[in-house]
């Protein structure tokens, strides 16, 4: 092997310095920097370089660590396997190009095995690794999986990157394009940093952008992710939770869900923070899954058991999706880790969503729903500003919304809701504070519907009325609801409609109700003492 010149070493040092302090130190101290050309690789986009790139990786590993350098050029490859203390550096102008031949993937050397859910797609990937430490994929080059060659409908389509049970992982700077399925998947990993990457994944099916499953201490920042299927996704495909994760300063687009926890939730999600992100539907592609207008901006789901606890989502700007906020506790009950029987219904609690603005959303409305006997707990929304298409008919107010306990969770699963703003069912501990809801067209549904909700507060709800619309708020079998600081803007019918024999402990206080003809209408089964109407400002003619 030829020794690289001093100028190459200096260049790699500067590149790696931009990729992070740890790998800058690695470059300075590494015994080996391997140029893949010295192992027989040709960057012509035609010569298969799998063995050459793998030989460079193995050389670095044998020398106790180092950097594998892909200079400018197009390097055609099948599956390559990372090793501990090895950084894969893609220089500016470099493309790692996935082979179109299925025979070039996986193979007998180090098969990663099937995914935790048993699906075949877990076997293949362009870059793979298991049980590794101190690994990196970085630089200003491109990883292109040529996924359009794998548009068959079974699940044996290669991912771009799949790392399992790895520790101290850095993914930085690279452009990722066109995987056969998910662009990247990090499962049961610890101490993962993903920053400054650009993902465009619309070539085949199941084209997720970035998936992190059952991993801990993960930091995702400053990324651009545009995908057909879900974009930035936390999953829990084993009984181990996905925990201690931050997602910040990202630009996210998806025909499905932009920022999502689920669908797989075996171990749940704990200590998760999402902040300072912008969300829109993809602008340059048509949907394979989902819809051209993406399904959800933020989707929080527990449907396969597991616990969602201590989750915050803040400072999110959303435009052009179907549903900006979707929260679901369900019972699909997929088993993981070959556990006997189906898992018990999970828990979803202690979630805060704040400072979210969304425009050009569909007429469906947002939903926060649990199941009978399994309530979503302690969910607080504050400083939320939403604009929907509107156009909802009065008939949707009385439409029965099925529970769909075992259904796949999706923001569109209930159809157009009885509320154009928020439909909340089976919830204990709900706060709606400083919520502004508008519709572009006249909408005759409620602004908010609460059904089987306990211990709730609605403060400063600002929702525009349409003539002949239903009451602004409907509460059915609700106990312990405090409504204050609301000021309906336009003259209409009732402010609050109550129903259900279990309705009790509702207090209206400090609201300006001069814009409504009635403060409260009650169904016959509601106790006369269920609602306390005190210290509100009413119209003088009432």
Image (cartoon, rainbow, N blue to C red):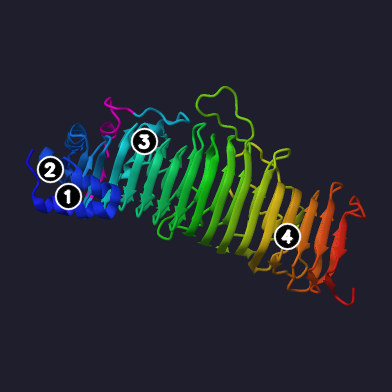
Query: Is residue 521 rendered to the left or right of residue 180?
Result: right
Disc on the earlier residue, 4 or 3: 3
Residue on which the image places disc 1: 71
When the figure is inspected, residue 25 is found, relative to residue 518, above or below; the finding is above
Query: Which SS class for mark 2?
Result: helix
User: Is the residue under label 2 in contact with that under label 1 (CB below 8 Å)?
Assistant: yes
Number of the front mark, 2 or 3: 3
Disc on the earlier residue, 4 or 1: 1
> Among all residues in the image, which is located at the extreme top?
340
Residue 43 showing in the rendered view: yes
User: Is the residue under label 1 in contact with that under label 3 (CB below 8 Å)?
Assistant: no
The region drawn magenta spans 95-111
Q: How far apart are marks 4 and 1 (CA)?
A: 59 Å
What mark, if any, has residue 37 been given in the picture? 2
Viewer-nearest residue: 468 or 73: 73
Residue lying at 41% horizontally and 30% vertically, measured from the top left? 120
Residue on which the image places disc 3: 166
> Among all residues in the image, which is located at the extreme left?
2
Query: Is residue 223 rendered to the left or right of residue 311?
Result: left
Disc on the earlier residue, 2 or 3: 2
Query: How many other residues sit within 10 Å of disc 2, few (<14), some (14-19) or many (≥20)?
Result: some
Q: Report which quarter residue 35 is drawn in.
A: top left
Residue 143 showing in the rendered view: no
Disc on the earlier residue, 3 or 1: 1
Query: How many other residues sit within 10 Å of disc 3, few (<14), some (14-19) or many (≥20)?
Result: many
Residue on which the image places disc 4: 458
Q: Distance between the residues labelled 4 and 3?
A: 45 Å
User: Is the residue under label 3 in contact with that under label 2 (CB below 8 Å)?
Assistant: no
């Amino acid at each position: 092997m030829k020794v690289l010149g001093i100028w190459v070493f200096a260049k790699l040092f500067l590149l790696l310095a931009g990729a992070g302090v740890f790998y800058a130190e690695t470059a300075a101290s590494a015994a080996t920097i391997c140029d893949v050309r010295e192992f027989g690789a040709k960057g012509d986009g035609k010569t298969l370089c799998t063995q050459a790139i793998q030989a460079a990786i193995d050389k670095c590993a044998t020398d106790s660590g180092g950097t594998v350098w892909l200079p400018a050029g197009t390097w055609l490859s099948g599956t390559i396997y990372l090793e501990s203390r090895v950084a894969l550096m893609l220089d500016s102008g470099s493309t790692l190009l996935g082979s179109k031949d299925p025979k070039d993937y996986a193979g007998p050397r180090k098969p990663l095995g099937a995914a935790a859910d048993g699906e075949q797609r877990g076997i293949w990937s362009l870059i793979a690794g298991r049980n590794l430490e101190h690994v990196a994929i970085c630089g200003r080059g491109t990883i292109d999986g040529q996924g359009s060659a794998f548009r068959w409908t079974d699940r044996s389509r290669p991912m771009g990157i799949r790392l399992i049970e790895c520790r101290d992982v850095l993914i930085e700077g690279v452009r990722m394009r066109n995987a056969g399925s998910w662009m990247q998947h990090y499962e049961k990993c610890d101490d993962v940093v993903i920053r400054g990457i650009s993902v465009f994944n619309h070539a085949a099916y199941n084209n997720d952008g970035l998936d992190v499953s059952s991993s801990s201490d993960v930091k995702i920042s400053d990324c651009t992710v545009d995908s057909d299927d879900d974009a930035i996704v936390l999953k829990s495909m084993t009984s181990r939770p996905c925990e201690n994760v931050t997602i910040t300063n990202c630009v996210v687009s998806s025909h499905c869900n932009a920022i999502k926890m689920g669908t797989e939730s075996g171990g749940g999600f704990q200590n998760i923070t999402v902040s300072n992100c912008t969300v829109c539907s993809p602008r340059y592609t048509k949907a394979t899954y989902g819809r051209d207008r993406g399904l959800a901006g933020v989707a929080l789901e527990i449907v396969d058991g597991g616990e969602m606890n201590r989750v915050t989502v803040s400072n999110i700007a959303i435009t052009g999706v179907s549903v900006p906020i979707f929260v679901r506790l369900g019972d699909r009950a997929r088993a993981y880790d070959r556990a006997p029987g189906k898992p018990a219904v999970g828990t979803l609690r202690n979630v805060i969503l704040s400072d979210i603005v969304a425009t050009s959303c569909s007429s469906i409305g947002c939903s926060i729903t649990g199941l009978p006997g399994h309530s979503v707990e302690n969910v607080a929304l504050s400083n939320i500003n939403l604009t929907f298409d509107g156009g909802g008919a009065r008939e949707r107010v009385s439409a029965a919304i099925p529970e769909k306990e075992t259904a796949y969770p999706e923001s569109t699963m209930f159809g157009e809701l009885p509320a154009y703003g928020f439909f909340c069912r089976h919830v204990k501990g709900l706060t709606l504070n400083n919520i502004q809801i508008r519709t572009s067209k006249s909408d005759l549904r409620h602004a908010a519907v609460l059904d089987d909700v306990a211990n709730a507060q609605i403060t400063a709800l600002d929702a525009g009325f349409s003539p002949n619309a239903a009451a602004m708020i409907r509460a059915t079998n609700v106990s312990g609801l405090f409504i204050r600081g609301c000021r309906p803007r336009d003259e209409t019918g009732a402010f609050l409609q109550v129903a259900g024999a279990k309705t009790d402990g509702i207090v209206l206080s400090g609201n300006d109700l001069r814009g409504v003809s009635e403060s409260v209408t009650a169904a016959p089964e509601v106790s006369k003492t269920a609602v306390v109407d005190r210290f509100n400002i009413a119209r003088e003619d009432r």
